[in-house]
Structure formats: structure tokens, C-alpha cells
Image (spheres, rainbow, N blue to C red):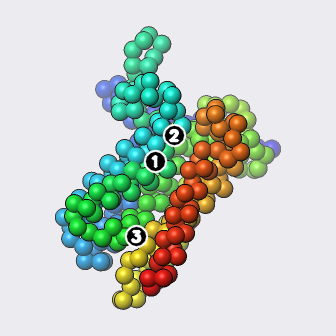
């Protein structure tokens, strides 16, 4: 059977010796596209431009810091707690005993969500906005960034899937010669489906002039994203060695609280209709 051979160099080019990678470009692109869509939503709802600009600053910092800390503390706590500089700086040790620039390798989607929620709470406290309103707006566009990030993982040949014989299996030549599920693509498509569904829901509900944000979009996105994530984990290779002894991997365990939270918000939104 003919499989897809994947051997993309993660580095596009170098600037003064510093590598510019597909992952970084896609990460930033996802944030930009999400920001443009969110700006449109804010304009439709008559929210001040100044509040939007502050929200973007809080959100970007929250997502990045949370995603980085999440990976370091959830998946490799022993290593990073003994190498704290590598949590903050995009470097790794080399064979000569020095450091080499690698970019930030290791960002956790669960940590990103926690960081975003923390940043939004702080934003609402400082700007006197209603948290549930902001959660609903951010939820609509957040899957877009996730979609771009998983394509970045594909370009890095990371977060690979388990061995497979399906016609669309990828052979990640930078890892091994085994055909595998393209788990990164599965997740990217799942996020795109989530965004499409929630945007259609938003367009439909927006026609009701009496509608007030009540957590429906936020709850729906949490449930869809993390149910997809939970299921797709069955097709992924474990990311760290200690997951080999676990019935559910770390990604699945961390998904369960988010799914429960999403259900609570959906139920709450129906009671507040």
C-alpha cells in the first residue's frame, strides 16, 4: 500500500543564524486570524476598540504562558523544574555543554486554556467587563488558533499517531519508517469543525435581538474541543514515558474537567435563557 511520506524541514529559513520555523509562523497566523474574526464580533456588538485591544494583549500572553507552563509541568516536570531557564527561554543544551536556540518546543493546549481563562478573569477585573460575555466571544474564535497550531505540529513531525494501515497514513521519516495516523491533522480538522459549528450557532442566535451572552458558546466549545481531544488521543502515541503505564493518557485525564465544565455552562445557559 502506498502511504504519504512526510519529511518536511521544520525550518523555513534562518535570519542571522536564528531559525524561522513553520510552527512559529502558523502559531502567529492562527492568532492573527482569530483576532480579525473577534474584532468583527466586537464591532457587531458595539464594544469599544480600546477594550478589544486590551483583550488581545491579555489573551495572547495568557495563552502562551499557560501553554508553555502546562507542557513543562504536566508532561516533563522533573526535567524542567531542574532546568527552569529552559521554561522561559527557547533554548536547549547541546553536546558542548552550551545552549542552542531551538524555539519553544512544547506547548500544552490544556495549559493554554487555563492560562487564557486566568488572563480573561484578570482582564474583566481590570476593565469591569462581564466575564461570561468575554468567555463567549473568545470561545467562538479560539478553535481557529488550535487548528493552525496542529498544522504546525504536523510540520514539525511531532505529536505523531499510532501505527496504522489506513490509506492516508503518514510515514514521518524524521521519526521512523512506520506508517502512522496523522493525529495532528485529525485534531486540526476537529478544531475547524468546532469553529464552523459554533460560528453558525452564533449567527443564528445573533438574529434574536433579546439574546444576552450566558455561556452557551463557551460551554459548547469546551465540550466539542475536549471530547474531540479525548477521542483523538486513542490514535496518538504517548508523548512521555510515564503515560505507558496509564489506562488514559495525560491529555485524556486533563480533558475530563473541561468537558464537565462545558456541560455545566451549557445547562446554566439554558436555565438563563
Give the residue at mark 3: 136
Question: In the displayed image of the protein, which residue is found farthest to the right?
Answer: 1
Q: Mark 3 vs mark 2: which is more N-terminal?
A: 2
In the rendered view of the protein, which quadrant contains the N terminus?
top right
Camera-nearest residue between 125 and 206: 125
Q: Is residue 137 visible?
A: no
Mark carried by residue 111: 1
Which disc, if any, is residue 194?
none
Residue 45 found in image quarter: bottom left
- Within 10 angstroms of label 2, few (less than 14), some, or many (20 or more) residues? some
Q: Secondary structure at mark 3?
A: helix
**Residue in the image at 45% along x and 17% along y:** 94
Counting residues from the N terminus, which is met first, the one under dot 2 or under dot 1?
2
Q: Is residue 198 left or right of residue 227?
A: left
Are the residues flagged by discs 2 and 1 in contact, CB closer than 8 Å?
yes
The percent position of residue 55, horizontal first and vertical second, equals 28, 60
Relative horizontal placement of residue 5, taking residue 55 as reference (left or right): right
Instruction: Using the rendered image of the protein, determine whether residue 169 is visible from the camera's viewpoint.
Output: yes
Q: In the rendering, at what x and y percent does residue 254 appear? A: 56, 50
Image location of residue 268, percent across then percent down: 48, 76
Residue at 48 percent across and 13 percent down: it is: 95
Amino acid at each position: 500500500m502506498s502511504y504519504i511520506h512526510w519529511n518536511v524541514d521544520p525550518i523555513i529559513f534562518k535570519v542571522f543564524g536564528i531559525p524561522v520555523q513553520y510552527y512559529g509562523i502558523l502559531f502567529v497566523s492562527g492568532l492573527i486570524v482569530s483576532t480579525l474574526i473577534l474584532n468583527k464580533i466586537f464591532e457587531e456588538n458595539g464594544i469599544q476598540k480600546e477594550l478589544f485591544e486590551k483583550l488581545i494583549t491579555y489573551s495572547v500572553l495568557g495563552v502562551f504562558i499557560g501553554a508553555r507552563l502546562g507542557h513543562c509541568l504536566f508532561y516533563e516536570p522533573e526535567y524542567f523544574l531542574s532546568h527552569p531557564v529552559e521554561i522561559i527561554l527557547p533554548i536547549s543544551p547541546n553536546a558542548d555543554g552550551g545552549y542552542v536556540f531551538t524555539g519553544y518546543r512544547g506547548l500544552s493546549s490544556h495549559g493554554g486554556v487555563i492560562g487564557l481563562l486566568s488572563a480573561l478573569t484578570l482582564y474583566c477585573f481590570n476593565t469591569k467587563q462581564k466575564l461570561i460575555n468575554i468567555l463567549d466571544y473568545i470561545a467562538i474564535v479560539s478553535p481557529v488558533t488550535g487548528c493552525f497550531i496542529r498544522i504546525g505540529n504536523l510540520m514539525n513531525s511531532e505529536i505523531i499517531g499510532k501505527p496504522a494501515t489506513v490509506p492516508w497514513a503518514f510515514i514521518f521519516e524524521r521519526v521512523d519508517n512506520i506508517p502512522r495516523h496523522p493525529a495532528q491533522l485529525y485534531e486540526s480538522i476537529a478544531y475547524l469543525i468546532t469553529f464552523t459549528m459554533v460560528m453558525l450557532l452564533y449567527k443564528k442566535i445573533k438574529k434574536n435581538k433579546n439574546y444576552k451572552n450566558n455561556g452557551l458558546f463557551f460551554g459548547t466549545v469546551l465540550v466539542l474541543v475536549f471530547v474531540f481531544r479525548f477521542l483523538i488521543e486513542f490514535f496518538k502515541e504517548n508523548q512521555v514515558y510515564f503515560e505507558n503505564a496509564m489506562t488514559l493518557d495525560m491529555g485524556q485525564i486533563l480533558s475530563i474537567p473541561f468537558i464537565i465544565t462545558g456541560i455545566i455552562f451549557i445547562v446554566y445557559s439554558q436555565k438563563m435563557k
